[in-house]
């Protein structure tokens, strides 16, 4: 088999299957080196390709050259988190119809900056701003519509969001909060939105950001919403509440919602280590909803948290 035929199975996965390398002949000990990440097994590379492929918005092999078992390709691709087109040279070595080695060569500084973890407070500021913006677009019919939180209207979900964030702000400010105040239904049935829901969200956003403005707050530990919980975890809970209930509200009201990709990634990573059977049994999250392998990161995160996008 011409090595280019094997290599083009690899590029078809990037071009048409969002990085899904199923069916691409990679050696078990496939090694890959690149400016952002390197791998020494096919399993590790396949896992990365699925994550990265979700962000690929365009992929084109501009030129391709072969020298025996070595194939060199010049490729252009686009990614959701970056403007413009990235160009790279990639070397793939093929033996007996199997890709055994890869090397990707390009200037990855812009991509490294885009992929660098953002401080949770910065993400929280952006997420709360996005949520306030979408709340400002909802009309009376939208507020009365059923939300994606079972049994609640869109307005009840908004009340729950603002009420919950207010309680979390009080906790990190040092107020004595009675655990009974954390009752979700009680927050949903209390009017926290008032006559100007967008202003209510911006108001609690300002308070939350002020509460976490001191980096020491992230290192302190608090008695609620769980015993001995770090401030960093509470900040991440605020981010999760803003992002997920923002979607609950937008989906119920039928308005557009375009959350920040970095906030989605942070919530996904936080939920993966904090949401389990215990939290689902308490009714905080529903059972996971299956999502396809090529689902975008937000759809996959919503599914993990029991939402059907």
Image (cartoon, rainbow, N blue to C red):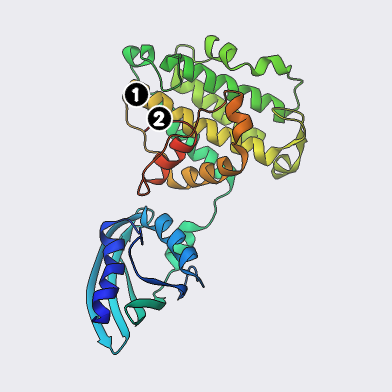
- Real-space Cα distance between discs 2 and 1? 7 Å
Relative placement, left or right, of 88 versus 158 is left
At which x and y percent is residue 45? Answer: 45, 65
Q: Are marks 2 and 1 in contact (CB under 8 Å)?
A: yes
- Locate residue 281: give its quadrant: top right
Question: In the rendered image, which residue does mark 2 sit on?
Answer: 133
Q: What residue is shown at x 54% (from left), y 24% (from top)?
A: 203
Tag 2, which secondary structure?
helix
- Locate residue 178: give its quadrant: top right
Residue in front for this viewpoint, 296 or 171: 296
- Is residue 213 something one can see in this rendering? no
Q: What residue is shown at x 61% (from left), y 43% (from top)?
A: 273
Query: Image height check: is 17 above or below 273?
Result: below
Query: Image height check: is 292 above or below 23?
Result: above
Which image quarter is the N terminus in? bottom left
Question: In the rendered image, which residue does mark 1 sit on?
Answer: 137
- Is residue 55 something one can see in this rendering? yes
- Locate residue 174: give its quadrant: top right
Query: Image height check: is 198 above or below 57?
Result: above
At which x and y percent is residue 159? Answer: 51, 16
Residue in front for this viewpoint, 205 or 108: 108
At which x and y percent is residue 6? Answer: 28, 74
Q: What residue is shown at x 48% (from left), y 38% (from top)?
A: 304
Relative placement, left or right, of 60 versus 29 is left
Is the residue marked by circle 1 packed among few (<14), some (14-19), or many (20+) residues within 10 Å? few
Which image quarter is the C terminus in? top left
Relative placement, left or right, of 79 versus 30 is left
Residue in front for this viewpoint, 257 or 97: 97
């Amino acid at each position: 088999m011409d090595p280019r035929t094997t290599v083009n199975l690899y590029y078809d996965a990037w071009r048409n299957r969002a990085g899904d390398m199923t069916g691409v002949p990679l050696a078990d000990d496939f090694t890959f080196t690149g400016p952002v990440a390197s791998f020494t097994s096919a399993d590790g590379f396949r896992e990365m390709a699925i994550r990265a492929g979700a962000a690929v918005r365009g992929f084109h092999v501009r030129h391709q050259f072969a020298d025996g078992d070595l194939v060199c390709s010049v490729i252009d691709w686009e990614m959701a988190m970056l403007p413009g087109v990235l160009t790279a040279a990639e070397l793939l070595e093929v033996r007996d119809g199997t890709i055994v080695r890869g090397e990707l060569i390009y200037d990855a500084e812009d991509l490294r900056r885009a992929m660098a973890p953002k401080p949770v407070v910065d993400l929280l500021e952006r997420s709360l701003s996005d949520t306030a913006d979408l709340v400002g677009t909802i009309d009376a019919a939208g507020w009365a519509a059923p939300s994606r939180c079972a049994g609640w209207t869109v307005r009840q979900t908004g009340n729950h969001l603002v009420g919950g964030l207010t309680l979390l702000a009080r906790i990190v400010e040092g107020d004595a909060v009675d655990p009974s105040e954390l009752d979700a239904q009680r927050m949903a049935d209390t009017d926290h939105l008032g006559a100007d829901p967008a202003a209510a969200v911006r108001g609690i956003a300002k308070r939350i950001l002020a509460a976490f403005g001191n980096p020491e707050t992230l290192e302190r530990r608090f008695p609620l919403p769980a015993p001995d919980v770090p401030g960093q975890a509470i900040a991440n809970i605020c981010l999760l509440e803003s992002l997920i209930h923002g979607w609950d509200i937008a989906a119920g009201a039928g308005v557009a919602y375009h959350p920040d990709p970095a906030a989605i990634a942070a919530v996904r990573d936080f939920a993966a280590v904090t949401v389990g059977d215990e939290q689902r049994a308490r009714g905080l999250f529903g059972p996971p909803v299956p999502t396809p392998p090529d689902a975008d990161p937000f759809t996959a995160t919503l599914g993990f948290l029991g939402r059907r996008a």
